[in-house]
Structures are given as C-alpha cells and as structure tokens.
Image (cartoon, rainbow, N blue to C red):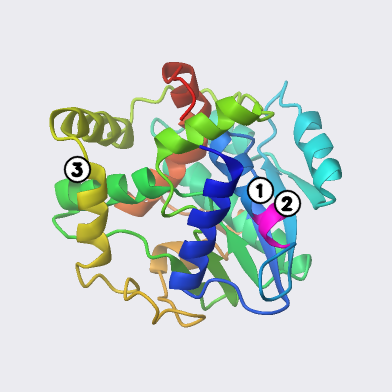
C-alpha cells in the first residue's frame, strides 16, 4: 500500500464518521507495532492538508519491561515534528509478578488504557486515536458472536463520559494486509514488544478463523465489514456520529487511575479481549506474516 492510498482511506473514515473537528488535539497511542506506526504516518501527513487544523501528540505507555527501547519511535517523531511522550509504569511487574495473572491481556489492557487516558488529559488532548484496522473490527464481531452471543463491534467514535475524552479509530477502512504491505514498503521502525504473553488467546483463534474463511471465500472480509456498518449496531450510523458517538462501559473504566484498576477483578469481554491482545501480539503476528508488499 502506498502512502497516498493510506491518506485516502484514513481521510474517508474521518469524514464518514466526523472524527476530527477544528483545533482538536489528538493523542496517538503508540505501541511500537506496525498498526500504531502506520496511524502515526497517516495523521502526521494529513494534518498538513486536512480542511480543518488539528494537532497530534504521540504517547507510549511503557509497561516497564527490560530491553524495550523506544529510540526508533523518538527519531521518527522528531522527523515528523510530532510531540512525543513516554509514560513510564510498572504495569508489567504488577500483572506478571505481583498478580501472576494466568490470562494477563485483559487486565494489562485496562491498566494501559487508564495510564494512557490520564496522561493524554494532562497533555491537554480532547481525543485519542487507536490503531484498530478493519481486521480488528471483524475479529471483534466474531468474538462477540461466538463468546457473548451478540452482534457487536466497537464503534468508530466512542465518547468516554467519565474523563471527557473521545476515542477515534481512523484506520477502520484499512485491511491488515495493507498495513503489512505499508510496513514493508516504507521500512517502518517497528519496536519489538518484550511482553511475555504467549499469544494463545481467543482473538488469535478468531484471527485464524477469519483468515481461513477469507481463503475459502475471497472478499469475505469486506462483506463482513459491510455487515457491521449496516447492522444497526449502536454508534455505526455513518455520518451521524460526531462527538456524540456512543458511550462504552468497558472503555469508561479505562478512565480510572492505575491504582484503582489494579484492584479490579479481571473481566472477560469481546472488546477487552481484542484490546488486551492487540498490542501484545502485534509484533508476533508480524513475524508470522512475512508477506510481499501490497
């Protein structure tokens, strides 16, 4: 995928769901994986020619693992002239050493979101951009159907009432295969995530299921995505979202402080399963997907 195609698809999503308004200050959650770096490329470029002015700030929540160097991300942000902040935490120690979680991804996601949202509010941001692409949305739909018995996928725009922060997902029209192609074509500075989680999650199962379905039925991803966009899911009415969006209880919990989240019981849900495993296994998927450029 070429940069111009990325700009086009991201801009289309932004306009279809009214994601960006004049003078927004948008934080981009940077994990160091291909998805978040691709989102950084997209918004860093779009801000120069988008019809309304907006600012971006890159933010990484450092979980405290040893050997996690963010120098390549810092260099990229300097090249793009993007403000960059690293939030240092001991989330990894809490989840793996103190709590010794057998299924750590969900709790880690809650704590990471809490740290991120608190930080971006302190930085004066009113929105935060997540790097969820089309495949992520389809996988969330399957997770909800298989494990919760409901037809659901997180919406393009989510307003967090408790902390007055809006989540946007500008990569929603981009296929993961195209992100991989973009990473290869532009040699993105990916930072390897040292998280010890092994990747054997429900989400990995659904990812493999989707891959097999697409192999047997070419084009099924686009049709499944159409089912989401036209399926009367709250928050998915194109052109009628704006700042209102929808309020998510799961995301709303992410506004709590790291200390309070630490005391919560782990809860299983489709969106948490996705969010919890997304960053942990993004680099693991890249090692599995040695694909040609698209």
The crowd level at tag 1 (other Cα within 10 Å; few <14, some 14-19, many 20+) is many
First in sequence: mark 1 or mark 3?
1
Query: Which residue position holds label 1?
Result: 40
First in sequence: mark 1 or mark 2?
1
Q: Position of residue 274 (x, y in %)?
A: 38, 45
Q: Are marks 3 and 2 in contact (CB under 8 Å)?
A: no
Q: Using the numbered discs, state the Cα–Cα distance from disc 1 to disc 2 in whole angstroms.
A: 8 Å
Q: Quadrant of residue 57?
A: bottom right
Q: Position of residue 90 (x, y in %)?
A: 68, 39
Q: Are marks 1 and 2 in contact (CB under 8 Å)?
A: yes
Q: Is residue 48 visible?
A: yes
Residue 181 on the magenta segment: no
* Disc number lying in front (1 or 2): 1
The structure residue drawn at horizontal position 43% and vertical position 77%, both measured from the top left corner, is 245
Q: Main secondary structure of the magenta part?
A: helix
Residue 44 on the magenta segment: yes
Residue stretch in magenta? 43-47
Is residue 276 left or right of 164 when viewed as pictured? left
Q: Using the numbered discs, state the Cα–Cα distance from disc 1 to disc 3 in whole angstroms.
A: 28 Å
The structure residue drawn at horizontal position 51% and vertical position 37%, both measured from the top left corner, is 1
Q: Quadrant of residue 215?
A: top left
Q: Which mark is residue 220?
A: 3
Q: Which residue is at the front of the view, 18 or 284?
A: 18
261 over 208 or under it: above or below: below
278 over 281 or under it: above or below: below
């Amino acid at each position: 995928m070429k940069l111009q195609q990325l700009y086009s698809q991201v801009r289309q999503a932004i306009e279809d769901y009214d994601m960006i308004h004049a003078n927004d200050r948008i934080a981009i959650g940077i994990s160091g994986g291909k998805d978040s770096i691709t989102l950084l490329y997209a918004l860093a470029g779009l801000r120069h020619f988008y019809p309304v002015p907006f600012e971006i700030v890159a933010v990484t929540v450092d979980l405290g693992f040893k050997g996690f160097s963010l120098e390549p991300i810092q260099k990229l942000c300097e090249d793009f002239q993007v403000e960059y902040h690293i939030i240092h935490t001991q989330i990894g120690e809490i989840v793996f050493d103190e709590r010794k979680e057998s299924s750590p991804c969900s709790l880690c996601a809650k704590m990471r979101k809490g740290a991120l949202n608190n930080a971006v509010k302190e930085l004066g941001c009113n929105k935060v951009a997540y790097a969820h692409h089309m495949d992520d949305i389809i996988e969330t739909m399957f997770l909800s159907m298989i494990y919760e018995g409901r037809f659901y996928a997180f919406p393009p725009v989510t307003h967090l009432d408790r902390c007055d922060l809006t989540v946007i997902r500008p990569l929603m029209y981009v296929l993961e295969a195209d992100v991989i192609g973009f990473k290869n074509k532009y040699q993105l500075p990916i930072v390897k995530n040292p998280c010890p989680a092994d990747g054997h999650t429900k989400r990995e199962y659904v990812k493999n299921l989707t891959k097999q379905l697409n192999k047997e039925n070419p084009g099924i991803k686009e049709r499944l995505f159409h089912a989401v966009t036209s399926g009367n899911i709250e928050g998915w009415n194109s052109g009628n979202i704006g700042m209102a969006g929808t309020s998510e209880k799961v995301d709303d919990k992410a506004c709590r402080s790291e200390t309070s989240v630490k005391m919560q019981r782990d809860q299983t849900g489709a969106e948490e399963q996705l969010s919890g495993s997304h960053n942990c296994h993004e680099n693991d998927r890249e090692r599995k997907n040695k694909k040609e450029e698209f």
